[in-house]
Image (spheres, helix red, strand yellow):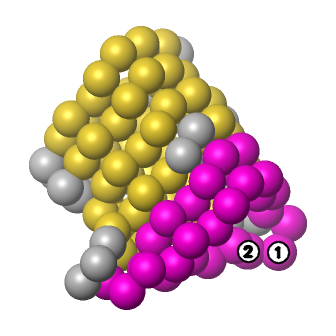
Amino acid sequence: MDFEESDFNTIISSDLAFTGKVHFTKPFLIKGKVSGQINATSDLVIDSEAVVNADIEADRVLVKGCVNGNVFGKSLVFVTSSGSITGDITSSQVVLEPGSSFSGRCTMVKENEA
């Protein structure tokens, strides 16, 4: 999951904080703070300085920052060395890079079940 900022239709910048429900169908980048619930049919990237306090459902989730909540990635959940998740992960494919932080349960399901 290698993205450029120009790949995203919507970006929550680092100086913004949002509370509520977020729904989207195109790639979405969070650089700021989000609290609530995130539901998507596309890719979600949580940048290295971002803080997300929400349950997440998306196709692919790339975590470079901090997530407090359960993460459901239909295809993939990828946590980089700078990323952390406190909550449960459910996906057909999970990648935890060395140096990443994860506290919770991990459930891997077949992609057609996800």
User: Is residue 106 magenta-colored?
Assistant: yes
Q: What number is the disc on residue 21?
A: none
Is any atom of residue 6 visible in this view?
Answer: no
Horizontal and vertical percent position of residue 104: 73, 54
Q: Is residue 71 left or right of residue 29?
A: right
Instruction: Classify mark 1: helix, strand or loop.
Output: loop
Q: Quadrant of residue 76?
A: bottom left
Instruction: Classify mark 2: helix, strand or loop.
Output: loop
**Residue drawn at x 54%, y 46% as measured from the top left:** 70
Disc 1 packing (10 Å; few <14; some 14–19; many ≥20): few
Task: Work out whether residue 108 or residue 63 is closer to the camera in this orientation and state it.
Answer: 108
Horizontal and vertical percent position of residue 85: 68, 49
Horizontal and vertical percent position of residue 4: 38, 60
Task: Work out whether residue 50 or residue 110 is closer to the camera in this orientation and state it.
Answer: 110
User: Is residue 103 magenta-colored?
Assistant: yes
Q: What number is the disc on residue 98?
A: 1
Q: Which residues are magenta?
A: 85-111
What amino acid is at disc 2? Glu
**Separation of disc 2 and disc 1 at Cα?**
4 Å
**Residue drawn at x 32%, y 72% as measured from the top left:** 114
| Mark 2 touches mark 1? (CB < 8 Å) | yes
- Residue that badge 2 annotates: 97
**Residue drawn at x 61%, y 77% as measured from the top left:** 95
Q: Quadrant of residue 74?
A: bottom left
What amino acid is at disc 1? Pro
